[in-house]
Image (cartoon, grey):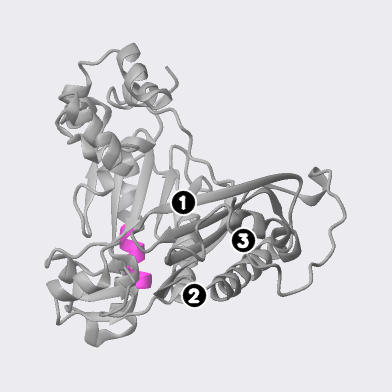
Amino acid sequence: MPPLRKIIHIDMDAFFASVEQLDTPVLRGRPVIVGGKPQSRGVVAACSYEARAFGIHSAMPCVRAYQLCPQAVFIRPRMDRYREISRKIMALFHRYTELVEQLSVDEAFLDVTENSLGQPSATRIAQMIRADIKATLHLTASAGVSYNKFLAKIASGHNKPDGMTVIPPERARDFIAALPIGKFYGVGKVTEKKMQAQGVRTGEDLLRFSQNQLQHLFGKSGLFFYDIVRGIDLRPVEPVRERKSIGTETTLAEDIDNNAEITDLLFGLITKVAQILADKETGGRTLTLKVRYSDFTTITRSATTPQGFFSASDMLTQLPRLLAATEAGQRKIRLLGITVSNLCRENETSRLRMHQLPLPFPRPTSPE
């Protein structure tokens, strides 16, 4: 068994909504919802704790959020501002250790086994970081401290907002045994239902299953569940996280089935993805079209080529075929998305010479 590490997981409290309350003091103490307009088809991206008291949560339709709390203040997201604050938070983390693994704009793992202060106590470092965030950025953060990533992340959400939970090795087994299975990392709604069908509702229940049983029930994930329920997680804190895909999508204001509108929207999405690829000097071998119909059925259609997708024209060569494999133009659509994955550099592909397609590109036809 390798030596135990000292891991901190920092999670900002209601980050988007807290930034809005910071920038607009009149919003402090009020229910704030960051997302779409109250009567729009958008969803809640984030909400303040005052809004959460009404049962509002992220990914909830804004219409439903308005029904629960008509007095809430709805604000459109300002991603540039959130990223600006995020950069300051991450810079603050790096004062303590170079081993910072950023998970999103508002959370990160820190390995402080060895740190810039020479401070032996991870708990003390977590306290200092939270105090620094509050003093310099006037925001609050919650922290989890333990000897691995799984426990640190679980701990950070255990005493929110503006709290901290420490799980030392000697407390880990009891803590995990009492943990509801839905709180386990990697256990989504589908897996949770499957586990409950097996009588698994807490970590203690999961401990009764052998490694072979869990692998039979959940495949490779079963091996992971077998380890973490015993407090074993050997994943290191990785300062550079490799991006696996680049994409964008849009939820439409109204359902559409007009081919001209569909292709115009997709051209806009492709142009945006192509710009990101160019900025990052990368591409990908797989292009995926995502379509969500008006009944919320979601499908994806993908194409993989050895020469890869590096520009809008590259993507446009495959788009008509992908569209033809959907029911675009026959069924109403509420969401469209474009993603490039299996990322690679141009010199890593056996790339063929591409030619700019004439625009507008051919309209999709129905599959035979």
* Residue 243 seen in the figure: no
Disc marking residue 299? 1
For the image shown, how many numbered marks are present on the structure?
3
The reply to whether callout 1 and callout 3 are in contact (CB within 8 Å) is no
N-terminal of the pair, mark 1 or mark 3, is: 1
Per the image, the residue denoted by label 2 is 80
Spot occupied by residue 144 in the image (x, y as percentages of width and height): 29, 45
Q: Nearer the viewer, residue 110 or 58?
A: 58
Per the image, the residue denoted by label 3 is 365
User: In the rendered structure, which amino acid carries the disc numbered 1?
Assistant: Ile
Image point (23%, 87%), residue name: 26
Q: Is residue 8 left or right of residue 263?
A: left
Give the crowd class for mark 3: few <14, some 14-19, many >=20 residues within 10 Å.
some
Residue 75 to residue 100: above or below: below
Give the crowd class for mark 1: few <14, some 14-19, many >=20 residues within 10 Å.
few
Quarter location, residue 278: bottom right
Magenta-highlighted residues = 130-138
Disc marking residue 106? none
Which label sits in the foreground, 2 or 1?
1
Spot occupied by residue 109 in the image (x, y as percentages of width and height): 42, 46
